[in-house]
Image (tube, grey):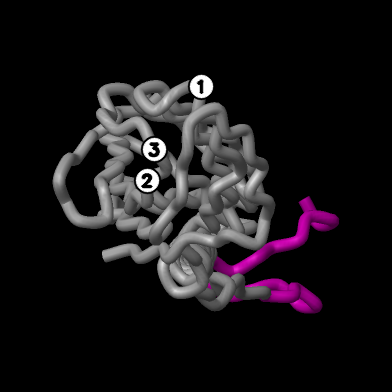
Amino acid sequence: MENQTRVAIGIPAPNYLITTHQPPPFIATYPTPPPAQQQSLSCPPLFIITSILIIILFVSLAFTGFYFTYQQSNPPIIRIESIVAFNITNWLITLSLKNPNKHASIHYEKIQVSVSKFDDKWHVICRVDEFNQVENGENLMDVDVFGLVDSKMVEVVLKMDAVVCLQAKYMQKHWQKLEVDCGVVVVQPRMNTTVGRSNRCNVRLR
């Protein structure tokens, strides 16, 4: 019993280290959005910019079509190509029609060619089928004239009217009235004349 060590209750033994543990400081953290979510946040500005560019592109195309169709469009060039008079009651008049526009086609409808005597004693109207004319295109139009009653040389007034449509890409159709005045033409029986490209008719669009 002499070798036993006695420890008083409540009194720490010598060389005993007392340690205390404190909780770590609290640091607030927020979750980082995934890459897909970060990319979606930048989509609305990109969509708006793309939409604006598309609108500008369509406006530019529409303005270009309007400029070349209406501001820069010219009426067709029409000439009397030839006149063939088999007899005084049966003629064949050939007209040359050229589209001078590079960016607009022309569609012809309700074509009427009128032949009247210079003193207006008689008047003949000849109707021609509708047709299309491409950009810078040229067509020959034959007009059969019947019903004239005269046995000698006659002077006639040759006119033409039609409804035409000038049309370019990205633009709506634009209809106009075409009026053509080829002036006075001398016709006699059994005549076969190539008038040539110098006899140009007066053309007006309205």
Residue 104 place in picture, x, y as percent: 53, 53
180 above or below 13?
above
Where residue 38 appears, as percent x and y from the top left, is 57, 59
The secondary element bearing badge 2 is classed as strand
Residue 86 image label: 1
Compare residues 198 and 135 and report the one nearer the observer. Answer: 198
Q: Amino acid at mark 2?
A: Val
Residue at x 50% of width, y 56% of height? 76
Measuring from the top left, give residue 102's x and y in whole percent. Answer: 64, 57
Name the residue beneath numbered marker 2: 154
* Label 3 CA crowd tier, 10 Å (few <14, some 14–19, many 20+): few
Q: Nearer the viewer, mark 3 or mark 1?
A: 3
Instruction: Give the farthest residue toward the front.
Output: 152
Q: Secondary structure at mark 3?
A: loop
* Residue 40 belongs to the span the image colors magenta: no
Determine contact: label 2, label 3, CB under 8 Å: yes
